[in-house]
Image (cartoon, rainbow, N blue to C red):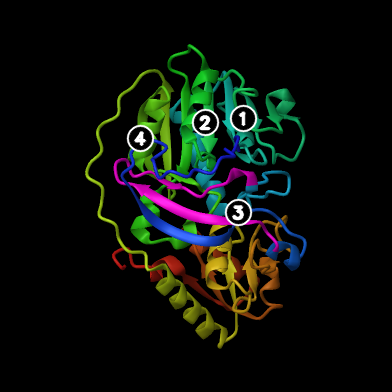
Amino acid sequence: MTTIDADVTTQPRCPICDSQATRPLVERANVPVHQNLLFASATEARGMKCGTLALRECTSCGFVFNVAFDGTLLDYGQNYENTQTWSGVNNRYVDELVRRLVEVHGICDGQIVEVGCGKGGFLLKLLSHPGNHSQAVGFDPAYVGPETLLDGRLRFVRDFYGPSTATRADVVVCRHVIEHISRPLELLRSVRAALGSAVGSKIFFETPSVAWIIRHRVLWDLFYEHCSIFTPYSLGLALTQAGFRVTAIDAVMDGQYLWAEAEAGAGTWPEPGPSAEPVPWNESARVARWQHLLAERRARGAVAVWGAAAKGVTFCNLADPQGVLLAGVVDLNPVKQGKFLAGTGHRILAPAELADHAIRTCFVLNPAYVSEIEQTLADLGVSADVIDMMALEEPTAS
């Protein structure tokens, strides 16, 4: 993570293109401000700080931002747990990113900096690639582990990345951080300043795609921590304004994320096309439909949601805020198991506990993991229906 801005944005002016042509997208009151904090009890989890989600969409560049965001409510620290390496699907995806960096882009020597390195898993994979002889520094206040690895080639700084901590780099990687920043141009300009006068230094940014979220009506992908969500155009515009030349912006992870590649140096970015007409979300109607489905399934046996990360936390807070419909939330991460979900207080279960709780239905919020979950259940001998919630959300429905 990098520094989260402490001011509450009060004017609906786009932080990327400065346009006042913005329109409301989603409004929710009293939402948990964190999705990945760990809680030792249901009571503590239900006492999670709450804020207001008031997302607006810029009709000029497509950027989506929370005008009610208050960074002082956030507390990224060592109880923040967003590691995804327990999933084979995620590991294969990360392995492909590493291969792309080393074998396609030739990232094999020099100094790498990762902004928001989490627990360091991505950097460890990147530097462990047999063709990579680089050194690296990872920045994150939530990092837990040794300060150095790989005989000193890999070093960690338990702090936010910013003007006072930035260090020299030939390559900067930033995965799933910029969406947490209310003033993303400041982050990008800090990265550019740290690269100095060097022209051609490479940066790689990964962030959720708001175009994918809107097209598929994925309401559980909109939550407080993500105060800045990009379209391909708005991400490219932001990088260009910060002093980078964009070389590629690709949709990755089945279209859910944007992967941006750029170099230090002046660049241009084309004018955007006309903004799409707004499509009503009908959030209350959708939530009511989910609750009806959960109740219907619960009548046949216990019900669980798979995934105790941002999507699962958001879905549970929308569909089962009182914690009466779901028997729990399943997660592969052993650090999360036995803890409780932010806001609702649902218990986080290990897959091996499903039989003990007589789970008969598992709801899945990310279609990329459906096959892996079905195989996990089969390996455990658990007979439970797996329902892909995305398959129930028609992209063209209102």
* Whole-number angstrom distance, CA of label 1 to CA of label 2: 9 Å
Mark 3, secondary structure of its residue: loop
Mark 1, secondary structure of its residue: loop
Q: Which residue is mark 2?
A: 187
Q: Is residue 398 left or right of residue 225?
A: left
Mark sitting on residue 33: 3
Amino acid tagged 2: Leu
Residue 387 lies, with reference to residue 5, above or below; the image says below
Residue 366 visible from this viewpoint = no
Mark 4, secondary structure of its residue: loop
Q: Residue at x 34, y 57 (%)?
A: 215
Indicate which disc, 4 or 2, sits on the residue closer to the N terminus. Answer: 4
For the residue pair 120 and 345, the one nearer the viewer reads as 345
The image shows residue 293 at horizontal and vertical percentages of 48, 80
Residue 237 lies, with reference to residue 360, above or below; the image says above
Q: Which residue is mark 1?
A: 161
For the residue pair 94 and 81, the one nearer the viewer reads as 81
* Whole-number angstrom distance, CA of label 4 to CA of label 2: 16 Å
Badge 2 crowding class, 10 Å Cα cut-off, few under 14, some 14 to 19, many 20 or more, is: many
Residue 32 lies, with reference to residue 273, above or below; the image says below
The segment highlighted magenta reads 47-72
Amino acid tagged 4: Cys
Cβ–Cβ below 8 Å for labels 1 and 2?
yes
Quadrant of the snapshot with the N terminus: top right
The image shows residue 304 at horizontal and vertical percentages of 60, 73
Mark 2, secondary structure of its residue: helix
Cβ–Cβ below 8 Å for labels 1 and 3?
no
The image shows residue 64 at horizontal and vertical percentages of 41, 47
Badge 1 crowding class, 10 Å Cα cut-off, few under 14, some 14 to 19, many 20 or more, is: many
Q: Is residue 388 left or right of residue 125?
A: left
